[in-house]
Amino acid sequence: MVDKKDSIWVLNGPNLNLLGLREPDIYGHETLDDIAEMLSERADALGLSIEMRQSNHEGHLIDWLHEAQGAGAKAVLLNAAAYTHTSIAIYDAILAITTPVIEVHLSNPETRESFRSVSWVGKAAHANISGLGAKSYLAALEAAASL
Ligand code: DQA
């Protein structure tokens, strides 16, 4: 029998489909596909698999958090983008599941506009990695692998 790999779900919120084009001075030149490829390569080496998703809709992120738990994901890496700063529904969804959630950001929201200093995701998440560009995702994957 072939062992099924533990999966890490990587959930991405609004406007992250435009990565590479969107404010590259803040978010870098890598696309979400580039990040997915980088994560898959590293996950392979760690004996893990990646489930990568993006939506511009809050409810999709909530449904996927529930689904990740149902699917037995080892951890979720969540870049909720602007919903980070506004969504109590996503905060509740993180608290509603036992799967560890690691908050990820490309930029460091703390050093930007003051409204980005509030993170509802961060109040519920297990850990937080920000400010390393696309490498924030890689660092979060390493952290998830070690949980
Ligand atoms: C972001 C930071 C958020 O404040 C912003 O709304 C985003 C991207 C990041 O990855 O740096 O859309 O989550």
Image (cartoon, rainbow, N blue to C red):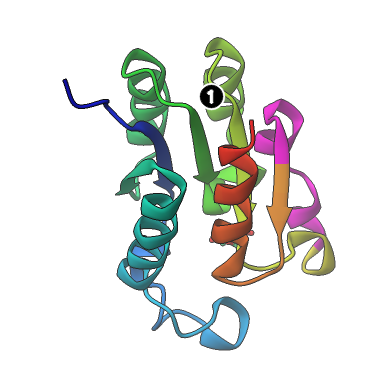
Q: Is residue 102 left or right of residue 13?
A: right
Task: Give how far across and how far down residue 67 sits, in percent.
Answer: 33, 21
Figure quadrant of the N terminus: top left
Q: Is mark 1 within 8 Å of ligand 1?
A: no
Above or below: residue 61 compared with residue 105? above
At 53% across and 82% down in the image, what residue appears? 28
Q: Residue at x 54, y 28 (%)?
A: 90
Question: Camera-side residue: 44 or 127?
Answer: 44
35 on left or right of 142: left
Residue 100 occupies quadrant = top right
Q: Is residue 127 above or below residue 40?
A: above
| Closer to us: 77 or 20 | 77
Residue 108, given in percent of the width and then of the height, sits at 74, 65
Percent position (x, y) of residue 21? 39, 83
Task: Determine which residue is flagged by label 1.
Answer: 89
Between 51 and 26, the one nearer to me in the picture: 51
Q: Residue furthest left?
A: 1
In what quadrant does ligand 1 lie? bottom right
**At numbered mark 1, what does the secondary structure look like: helix, strand or loop?**
helix
Residue bounds of the magenta highlight: 114-127
Q: Which residue is depicted at the point 63% across and 57% down?
A: 139
Q: Main secondary structure of the magenta part?
A: helix
Quarter of the figure with residue 4: top left
Tell me where residue 142 appears, x and y as whole percent.
60, 49
Determine if the magenta segment contains residue 125: yes
- Please name the amino acid that badge 1 sits on: Ala
